[in-house]
Image: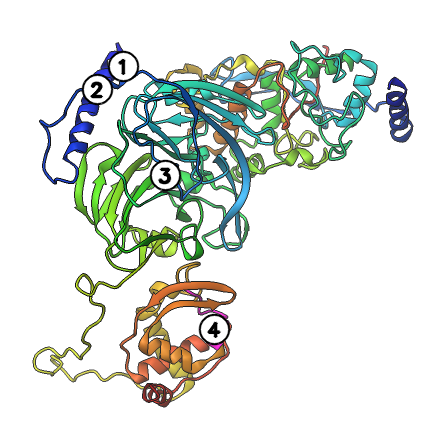
Amino acid sequence: MIKVYLFIAVLFVSFFGNTQEPTAMKKIKRGAFVPLYGSDSLGVYVPDFMLDEYPVTNKQYLEFVKTHSKWKKSKVLRLFADKSYLRKWVNDTTLSTEIKLNSAITNVSWYAAKDYCACQGKRLPSMDEWEYAAMASETKPNAQADSIFNSKIIESYELPKTYKNEVGHKFKNYYGIYDMHGLVWEWTSDFNSVLISGESRQDVDTEKNLFCGSASINASNLMDYAAFMRYAFRGSIKANYNIQTLGFRCAKSIKK
Amino acid sequence: MKKNRFNATSKAFAVLGLATLVACGQGEAGKDTAAKTVDSSTIEVSGEMKAELTAPPFVPASVGDRAAKKLIVDMEILEQEGTMTDGVKYVYWTFGGSVPGSFIRTRVGDEVEFTLKNHPDNKLPHNIDLHAVTGAGGGAASSFVAPGHEVTFSFKTLNPGLYVYHCATAPVGMHIANGMYGLILVEPEGGLPAVDREYYIMQGDFYTKGKNGDPGLQPFDMQKAVDENADYVVFNGKVGALTGDNALTAKVGETVRLYVGNGGPNLVSSFHVIGEIFDRVNIEGGTAVNENVQTTLIPAGGAAMVEFKVDVPGTFIIVDHSIFRAFNKGALGMLKVEGEENKKFYSGKQVEGIYNPEGGKIVATGDAPTAPTASTKAERIELGKQIYSQTCFACHQGEGQGIAGAFPPLAKSDYLNADVDRAIGIMLHGKTGEITVNGEVYNSVMTAQTLTDEEAANVLTYIYNSWGNNGTEVKPTDIMRVKSSH
């Protein structure tokens, strides 16, 4: 059996190349913004940082598990990834035929995503960093006030099965980053720092941060609704969850 | 303590419920006939069963006289593309794959074990708030579930009635606007009185990026939803869900109960069945019964049970009597009743004549206006257009497009263009029964139109020279010829 696996692995390696190309990173220029609800209901300052141009792909993750066997589908500890981990993979090194190598890796837990980035000498972006970079449209670093941009985001969130598309499918933003909206959701390092009870109406009433945050941007702002959907999603997940529509990309601090 | 307060309320409801049940059929108040007081919170359950769930317009079997049980409800959330109306697609978010979601039928005192499953391919987390739940959030907090996961929670049904359930995940309005609502019925001890037919109808308003009828996959429009400017107002999730082949059916003499809900998210429904009077309405889905009701108001996030006996055959149109919603936005359904005519209840047209007030003279101060006569085809079209907008517009619509499932199109109509004399005949004598227009079957009623020969010729010429039809000119002599051929 092992021989068969090896054979398949060799096939993959010889066919798709041996060395993993690291994803190019782009610099996100520092600045301040007001998140919908975060650690601080007033402005948040985000220092300069680097962010992957694309989400991590199936191909890249496949290379990773070959050399990091604790993240193989058959070996992973349930503590770090529930049984949906790599749900669509046939075995440790074979993807199902419906998955494209160049699509974003999904069905990976937060622990797996975190370790992947660490092994590249990178880290997961923080929620504030991710949200800050995600405010950028094609032309502006902060498109919070651009209603067309915002309704496009909401539309893209609604569209089913977008995880099947390849990376680079969605627009390249101001910083040169692709696929921030409408391909897959993405893990952030502190995704669970916003406590959403699941009873969103109660959150509106009692969560002071949320109340102030939303009041300061104006509750009818469409940006809120897109952000609501992301924060609600983050509030529903746990670190060992593996979800079909949830992938990740890595970030890196810039040393002074 | 909160719980105690609810118990007290439910006790009061239970007493009222019993009183009403006992009174039912006698038409008398039975306030003092309640045999016993049941505190629903103390009802013990015996055994367990899996709940039957049904897609609209159907409902599960009545609880009858079964004892309270542990009831297992298993519901899957699916985000899926569906059809809003011909040529218009929409991504619906659904409880159980239908809009409205599966109908849940329980009895008072049941202990419901509810499992909510969020399909792995779904993009968003969801939850459920059941208005039948006594508890903070109606189950919303404990049912919040990520895609590819499931949660289970339990509740006891304390108050009988018809209740809405819906998703309450942020942004709540958007989840509801995409179809995440349904009904849960809590029957009183012994079940609701038996009827011959029961159906499940739920109204909802939809907001699309394009206007009503704009083709293709239409995304949700948050701004229109905030402005409460609906493009579609429909029964059971789409235009035509209850018309044509999907019409509800009954036979003369049967009693019909409709479980009617309103998911909203914004609009309140003025629920009406044209040509019927509701014998009984459980107002707002609760215990109070009103009798002999023409139109009942159903709030967003509310429901009503309406009952009536169908006495005469025909097609009864179900509408939101905020009437532009019915004819222009889709809030239209049909109940087809088959059976023997009853001329005593409804005669049909008996005598037709000319009504001339004041002894046959038209009262006018100046010269009596004479009806204009067309001398050219162009004039005929022009005059016909005015008649169209007064007489035909309401059903066949401004562009002759008709209303899917209810009123056939006149635009590019194969049926119309195939036979001019037939079209004249329909205009003069009306038309009842099944016809096929552009591949769609219609089974509706058009009444005979009282137009002069000149007017009939003009309006038909207008129709034949509009919206891609074959350009026939119909002359008053053609009308006379068809009239005399019968």
User: Residue A218 in the image: x percent, y percent?
Assistant: 42, 28
Name above or below for residue B136 compared with residue A146: above
Return the mark for residue B264.
3
Say whether marks 4 and 2 touch (CB < 8 Å). Answer: no
Magenta segment: B408-417
Return the mark for residue B485.
none
* Foreground label between 2 and 3: 2
Say whether marks 1 and 4 touch (CB < 8 Å). Answer: no
Which comes sooner in the sequence, label 4 or label 2?
Answer: 2
Cα gap from disc 4 to disc 2, whole angstroms: 62 Å
The chain letter for the residue carrying disc 1 is B
The chain letter for the residue carrying disc 3 is B
Name above or below for residue B210 compared with residue A176: below
Residue of label 2: B38
Going by the numbered disc 3, the residue's amino acid type is Gly
Say whether marks 3 and 1 touch (CB < 8 Å). Answer: no
Which comes sooner in the sequence, label 1 or label 4?
Answer: 1
The chain letter for the residue carrying disc 4 is B
Say whether marks 2 and 3 touch (CB < 8 Å). Answer: no
